[in-house]
Image (tube, helix red, strand yellow):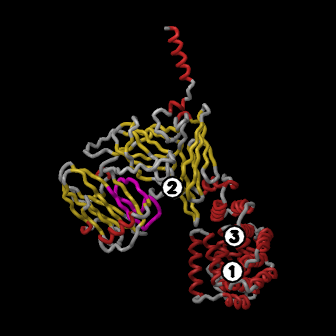
């Protein structure tokens, strides 16, 4: 029997070895949940007789509202949980009652319903931000009505703060808000405390529900405490509830709560340690049900750039897979068609919004796991300032993008970013990628017009003409005729230009604004021919503006401001708007000189010279304040192009005809140097 018993034990042991490891991992697992975190809570130094509370930040797979998140002790007993923050991305902050030790956090159960816990921590300082409903802040009763209505509306964000000291909404870009700070503090003996508020916009402090201090009405912030914004509270020993209400709108978002304790002569911002602390928990281990490894990652917005109408949002993604030491391969998919590999990676989004980011992790033994989490690409408003990357870094990363994997709206954005940087070749490649796709009529037209403009910029006028004619073959539209006419004016094919403008003028279905622009184009033809009188007559017919001289001066100043900060693209935009509103500005000389300066800033010397020579011809024999500057700039343009002979001719003309001009001495120096 003894021999048989030993063989029985051996057989049993061998059978156990054949059981999959995942079966052991399932022991004690909460049924129906896919993910489990082991959470460690440190010892607390706080000895207040108030229930302890734990705060945990984590990234993981849970429902959008966090209703499937559960906390248990190691024995499996469920503990109430308060979902502090959850929303459009899979990052969460939760609080739960607990002493030092270890706990399990379960998530990832789509069928789980909210347990309906009614527990909130009586510790820390919790901020809730709501969209403001109402604007009548004349007195406390009306403000209370705004607060209650706002609380029933959209919760913008919620989270624990160190102190009441915010200059803006830390949870988003909303400015019209109601901010409610709720904090708990404990007094070991009776004490009289003096509170104060210093804010921009209305603010109120209550303690245990009783009003203490306020600063009513819309107003700016001041760097000191007003006596009328203070108040005393005689408090008993024990737990007390502090609430700070702030009503905000744009430029009135600063909220500061101050405190003057006994034996103190001045107010200080209420320190973070005034409120009862919450223990900060940490994740010791992450598990995925039935898996030997558990893929996981975190993210943060590290760099941000607002460039014209576009945003560049750079995120750092960090691997937090378990076990940390066993993972050897990481494959990232960022949800916008782009991918990367490596443990920790950076990625820039060119469109804001929610993206499903996937991490595939593999260990050295071939075990694998993957997880997809929703990441919201948007500016992190909790940070005072996020610096952009260098231009070179952005362009290097964007240059690695797989264009075929980007959606149409992302490609349009990328092309616009390249254009804003003055990179016509890069932008054109993007538009060419778009042109190969299935597009609707408006998208096709947008691609065509942008591509044609870039071809013109590169001097490929025949390619631009071909694009315009292709668009017209699909649908004859006034704006395309106008652009084709402008192209022919630029290339000196004036008869072809006139034909395009006449089509607009003679087509009754085109609107008056299009016909006005066509008439302005006819003026351009006379201008290029050098016929000042006919150009002026035509331009005047095309302009319906009043106070033209004043408006022209305002346009000129705005262009000069752009040129001073070396923003040539903005200068071009304002110059074109100026010419559109006041076409006879093209005869003044100021417009031509400023346009030439913008071209020369971008090293487009041929375009600068062409524009200046048109003006010089149209101004021949007329007194014009800007003629000496135009001649001098034309000399500089030809000098840059290497045509020293033409440059000398223009400099000599300045010296011979305009000895009293401001550019006379400069022309002399230039001529001596050639």
- Mark number for residue 655? 1
Residue 419: percent from left, percent from top: 66, 64
Q: Foreground mark, 1 or 2?
A: 2
| Quarter of the rendering occupied by the C terminus | bottom right
Most foreground residue, 276 or 87: 87
- Mark number for residue 621? none
Does 344 sit above or below residue 203? above
Question: Is 294 placed left or right of 413 in the picture?
Answer: left
Query: Residue 566 occupies which quadrant of the picture?
Result: bottom right
Q: Which numbered disc, 1 or 2, marks the residue that appears first in the sequence?
A: 2
SS label for mark 1: helix
Q: Are marks 3 and 2 in contact (CB under 8 Å)?
A: no
SS label for mark 3: helix
Pointer 3 local density, CA inside 10 Å: few below 14, some 14–19, many at least 20: few
Q: Is residue 138 visible?
A: yes
Q: Foreground mark, 1 or 3?
A: 3
Residue at the disc numbered 3? 442
Q: Are marks 1 and 3 in contact (CB under 8 Å)?
A: no
Q: Which residues are magenta?
A: 157-182
Most foreground residue, 581 or 289: 289
Residue 87: percent from left, percent from top: 48, 55
Residue 292: percent from left, percent from top: 55, 34
Alpha-carbon span between mark 1 and mark 3: 53 Å
Residue shown at 55% from the left, 60% from the top: 305
Q: Which numbered disc, 3 or 2, marks the residue that appears first in the sequence?
A: 2
Q: Which numbered disc, 1 or 3, marks the residue that appears first in the sequence?
A: 3
Residue shown at 57% from the left, 89% from the top: 547
Residue at the disc numbered 2? 88
Residue 581: percent from left, percent from top: 63, 83
Question: Is 277 placed left or right of 662 in the picture?
Answer: left
Alpha-carbon span between mark 1 and mark 2: 69 Å
Does 507 sit above or below residue 95? below
């Amino acid at each position: 029997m003894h021999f048989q018993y030993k063989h029985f034990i051996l057989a049993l042991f061998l059978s156990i070895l054949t059981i999959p490891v995942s079966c052991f991992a399932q022991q004690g697992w909460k049924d129906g949940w896919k993910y489990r975190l082991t959470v460690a809570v440190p010892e607390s130094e706080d000895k207040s007789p108030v229930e302890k509370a734990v705060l945990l930040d984590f990234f993981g797979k849970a429902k959008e509202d966090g209703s499937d998140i559960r906390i248990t002790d190691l024995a499996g007993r469920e503990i109430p949980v308060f979902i502090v923050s959850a929303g459009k991305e899979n990052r969460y902050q939760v609080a739960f009652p607990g002493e030092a030790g270890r706990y399990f956090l379960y998530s990832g159960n789509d069928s789980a319903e909210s347990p309906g816990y009614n527990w909130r921590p009586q510790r820390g300082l919790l901020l809730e931000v709501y969209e403001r409903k109402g604007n009548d802040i004349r007195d406390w009763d009306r403000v209370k009505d705004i607060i209650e209505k706002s609380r029933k509306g959209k919760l913008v964000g919620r989270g624990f703060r160190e102190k009441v000291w915010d200059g803006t909404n830390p949870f988003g870009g909303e400015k019209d808000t109601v901010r409610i700070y709720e904090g708990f503090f404990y007094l070991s003996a009776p004490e009289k405390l003096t509170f104060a508020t210093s804010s921009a916009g209305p603010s109120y402090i209550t303690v245990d529900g009783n009003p203490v201090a306020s600063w009513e009405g819309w107003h700016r912030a001041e760097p000191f405490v007003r006596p009328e914004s203070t108040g005393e509270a005689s408090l008993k020993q024990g737990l007390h509830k502090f609430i700070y209400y702030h009503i905000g709108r744009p430029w009135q978002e600063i909220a500061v709560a101050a405190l003057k304790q006994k034996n103190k002569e001045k107010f200080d911002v209420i320190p973070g340690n005034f409120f009862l602390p919450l223990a900060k928990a940490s994740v010791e281990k992450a598990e995925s049900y039935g898996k030997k490894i558990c893929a996981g990652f975190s993210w943060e917005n590290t760099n941000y750039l607002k460039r014209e109408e576009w945003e560049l949002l750079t995120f750092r993604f960090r691997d937090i897979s378990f076990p940390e030491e066993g993972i050897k391969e990481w494959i990232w998919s960022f949800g916008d068609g782009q991918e990367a590999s490596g443990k920790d990676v950076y990625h820039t989004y060119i469109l804001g919004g929610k993206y499903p980011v996937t991490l595939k992790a593999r260990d050295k033994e071939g075990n694998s796991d993957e997880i997809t989490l929703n990441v919201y690409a948007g500016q992190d408003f909790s940070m005072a300032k996020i610096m952009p990357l260098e231009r070179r870094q952005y362009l290097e990363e964007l240059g690695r993008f797989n264009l075929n994997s980007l959606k149409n709206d992302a490609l349009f954005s990328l092309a616009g970013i390249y254009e804003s940087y003055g990179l016509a070749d890069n932008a054109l490649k993007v538009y060419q990628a778009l042109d190969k796709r299935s597009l609707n009529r408006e998208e096709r037209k947008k691609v065509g017009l942008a591509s044609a403009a870039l071809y013109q910029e590169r001097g490929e006028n025949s390619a631009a003409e071909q694009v315009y004619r292709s668009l017209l073959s699909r649908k004859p539209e006034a704006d395309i005729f106008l652009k084709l006419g402008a192209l022919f004016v630029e290339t000196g094919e004036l008869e072809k230009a006139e034909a395009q403008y006449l089509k607009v003028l003679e087509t009754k279905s085109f609107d008056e604004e299009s016909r006005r622009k066509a008439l302005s184009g006819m003026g351009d033809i006379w201008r290029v021919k050098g016929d000042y009188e006919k150009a002026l007559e035509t331009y005047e017919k095309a302009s319906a503006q009043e106070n033209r001289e004043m408006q022209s001066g305002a346009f000129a100043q705005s262009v000069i401001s752009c040129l001073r900060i070396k923003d040539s693209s903005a200068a071009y935009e304002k110059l074109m708007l100026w010419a559109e509103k006041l076409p006879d500005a093209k005869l003044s000389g100021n417009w031509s000189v400023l346009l030439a300066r913008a071209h020369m800033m971008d090293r487009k010397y041929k375009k600068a010279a062409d524009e200046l020579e048109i003006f010089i011809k149209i101004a021949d024999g007329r007194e014009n304040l800007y003629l000496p500057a135009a001649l001098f700039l034309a000399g500089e343009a030809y000098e840059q192009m290497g045509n020293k002979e033409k440059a000398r001719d223009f400099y000599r003309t300045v010296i011979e005809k305009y000895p009293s001009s401001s550019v006379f001495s400069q022309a002399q120096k230039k001529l001596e140097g050639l």
